[in-house]
Image (cartoon, rainbow, N blue to C red):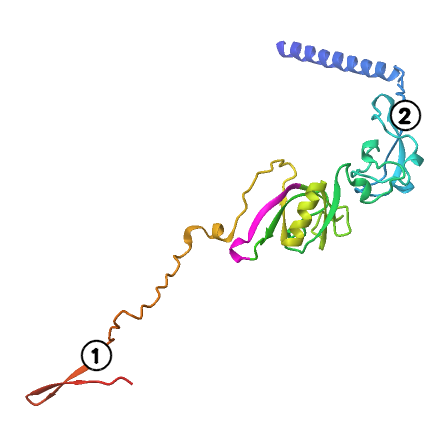
Amino acid sequence: MARMRVFIVLALAVAAGGTFAYGTYQYMQSVPTRTVEQPTSRVVVAATDLQLGAELKAGDLRAIQWPAGNVPQGAFSNPDELVGRGLILPVVQNEPFLPSKLAPKEAGAGLPPVIAPGYRALSVRVNDVVGVAGYVLPGTRVDVVATVNPTQQPTDVTSKVVLTNVLVLAAGTKIERDGEGNKPIQVSVVTLLVSPGEAERLTLASTEGKIQLALRNPMDQTAPATPGIRPAGLIGSGLSAPVRRVAANNSAPRQEIKPAPLPTVEIIRGDKRAQEAVAQE
């Protein structure tokens, strides 16, 4: 009898719960859906990834609807305002165009608009070794190490860091990175962004000696001062003592140098023994 009561109570609970759930579902279905329309504004974005120095064309631009309250300050709404302008910073796909990433009107595209006011773009000839085996790409930062010999004496050859944290604008004729995973590219000329004073140092270093580019982490902003190094400092104290030569004194008596004695053998003939020298051939 007790089991029957428990079964009846359980069945009533399940039936009541199912009825309540069905009634709730029917009520939610009957409630009309209200669509809230959020105001939007037209914003011009990049249709594809664009590299530094690129000249904007109609195919690189597209207009989308952007929430009106979140439109970036300075965003453009008309693509015609951007056609023909150059980029001074890379832009990724679907990124809004902002004035800070665009060259001024009539400034054109390519390298000149990228040069910041007060700076100069200076190109130096390099090879695969100087260019860190091709890993010096546009946008990377390098230190310039110069090796010069001011007196033409081998002992005065000096290597020293002459410029630090220099931005690479172009590698060869390219001002953008290699499109296939930033792979190394073969270049013979690297263009650096320098101040007028740094341009003088770099020109003198490349003319009077050899330069080497040291690739650095772009997040590293340190510029340690180095004293430079010469061959003697590179080898350290491992140099052998110089050989001292003493001039001959003709007045001093000359010592007679006696030849070394020849080796001898002992010969036994019967009860007699004799020592005889052996001549060497």
What residue sits 75% from the left and 52% below the top?
A: 172
Task: Using the rendered view, name the quadrant where residue 223 is placed.
Answer: top right
Q: Is residue 134 above or below residue 75?
A: below
Q: For residue 239, which numbered disc appears in the image?
A: none
The residue tagged 1 is: 261
Q: Where residue 112 sits in the image (x, y, percent)?
A: 81, 43
What residue sits 60% from the left and 36% below the top?
A: 222
Is residue 189 visible in the rendered structure shown here? Answer: yes
Residue type at mark 2 is Ser
Given residues 178 and 155, the one toward you in this image is 155
Q: Where residue 149 sits in the image (x, y, percent)?
A: 58, 54
Q: Main secondary structure of the magenta part?
A: strand
Q: Is residue 219 left or right of residue 86?
A: left
Given residues 208 and 115, the one toward you in this image is 208
Which SS class for mark 1? loop
Task: Using the rendered view, name the quadrant where residue 188 is placed.
Answer: bottom right
Q: Is residue 159 above or below residue 32?
A: below
Within the magenta stretch, is there residue 164? yes
The residue tagged 2 is: 41
Residue type at mark 1 is Pro
Given residues 214 and 181, the one toward you in this image is 214
Q: Which badge, 2 or 1, is on the more N-terminal residue? A: 2
Which region of the structure is painted magenta? Answer: 153-165
Q: Where residue 210 sits in the image (x, y, percent)?
A: 63, 54
